Amino acid sequence: MPTPEVADMTAGEMTALFATRELSPVEATKACLQRIEQHNSKVNAYNIMNEELTLEAAKQSEQRWQLGTPLGPIDGVPVAVKDIFITKGWPNRKGSTLTSPDPLKVDAPAIAALRRNGFVPLGRTTTPEFGWKGVTDNPLDGVTSNPWDPTKVSGGSSGGSGAAVPLGMGPLALGTDAGGSIRIPAGFCGVVGHKPTHGVCPMWPPSSFYPLAHVGPMTWTVADAALLMDVLAEPDARDMTLPSCTVSFRDALDVANVMGMRIAYSPNLGYVDVDPEVEAAVNAAASAFEEAGAIVETCDPGFSDPLEAFDILFYGGAANALRDIGPEDRAKMDPNLIKVAQWGSERSLLDYMGAANVRAELTEKMSLFHQTWDLLLTPTLPIPAFDAGLEVPKGWHHERWPTWTPFTYPFNMTGQPAVSVPCGFTKSGLPIGLQIIGPRHADVSVLQAAHYYQQVRPLTSIRPKMLTD
């Protein structure tokens, strides 16, 4: 039987041992399955498992490694799949009682790329219904909790993936992000979450939240995020953006260096109230880049809060997702999803086009900003994780989740790459995230900077306390 420490290995560490036959994909998979059995009941990260399918994929990978013919850089690595990706052989429930439990017969581009590279599907991870909000609870699966404190939120909408990785319930996880849904749980759960440049990682079917939606990795290390990006960025003819990426993100980390880079640090974007513990941790993180020879200056990007436009675009997407669902079925759904979808459906075409104009203006402003600044640093979130089962903290000034995610959704509107990397903990032990943002198509620079930071200020040896309780 594999030792429990195998589950804490990175994907890169696993494949290195697969190559020398010191570890097999079956052993690695069983170690992750054991962690799921031990800890999933505490956080509710996985909602669908199929051990037979999982172990069969691991056995096939083991045979390839024995023959010296692995399919790709992640062959045999267990991967947690957000329950929103269409996956052959698995149902796609999307956190909704209205969806079918029957297995599907086709793969989304991300899954097709993973399959071409020999992945092992561990199971499906939880999401709010249709991925609509920044916390993870839904009528089908209940509440997903934070692995560092199960009384707190994991974030969302990729909350199950965010909760799984710190507990060793899979070294690689898939997320989607239309307003922060990779970076929010990455920040709250203390993992790396990368939202790539829009279009770099193909999507199909087109998201109801297009053009805000992105596909990306959630991992324990930046190196693993880059490794997974090499797979997710493979082109797919079904994607309407037809991306073409020839760079290896993982290889680019070998030359990660921030010396001489011009880096803007904006602790509050000029308008955000930030928790003092979060601000202190992110201030300290920014200093690491200056110590490395980067030119770091406090500078806001100069835009006002685009929340009103984001709400129209995002809740218009929610209305789009529910367009064919009638009143009887809507009564079975998350009532707040129904509210925002109804609000979105009541906006006019000119309202929507006006929001698109704001998005275009914001994109132009940030493109010009990055003519001067190579990168922008901000907190990932202005607050630590709050009580589980709530959409907003108790006593919050607004009832909807985007009001506490002001650092994430603007960069869905611009389509820029942005990564959240852990940069500290609150006094109560909750993770804090640093967000690194670059100009469009500068994913390499963003990942290099995050990798550099993780090397000089590593937190990867610290795992949730529940692993030792």
Image (tube, helix red, strand yellow):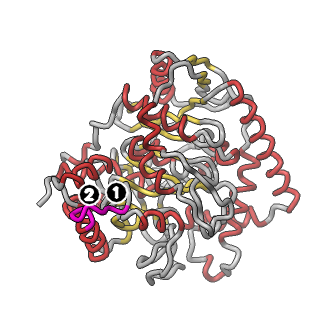
Rendered image: mark on residue 43: 1
The residue closer to the viewer here, 358 or 382, is 358
Q: In this view, does 374 lie above or below 109?
A: above
**Residue 404 visible at all:** no
Residue 21 lies left or right of residue 369; in this view the side is left
Residue at x 56%, y 41% (from the top left corner): 443
Residue 381 lies left or right of residue 432; in this view the side is right
Residue 138: x and y in percent read: 49, 66
Residue at x 33%, y 33% (from the top left corner): 459
The kind of residue tagged 2 is His
State the CA–CA distance, disc 1 to disc 2: 7 Å
Residue 94: x and y in percent read: 51, 70
Image quarter of residue 325: bottom right
Q: Which residue lies under the disc numbered 2?
A: 39
Confirm whether the magenta stretch covers residue 67: yes
Residue 47: x and y in percent read: 38, 68
**Residue 96 visible at all:** yes
Residue at x 36%, y 63% (from the top left corner): 71
Residue 249: x and y in percent read: 48, 44
Q: Which residue lies furthest to the front in this view?
A: 68
Find out whether the residues at labels 1 and 2 contact each other: C-beta distance under 8 Å: yes
In the rendered structure, which segment of residues is drawn in magenta?
64-71
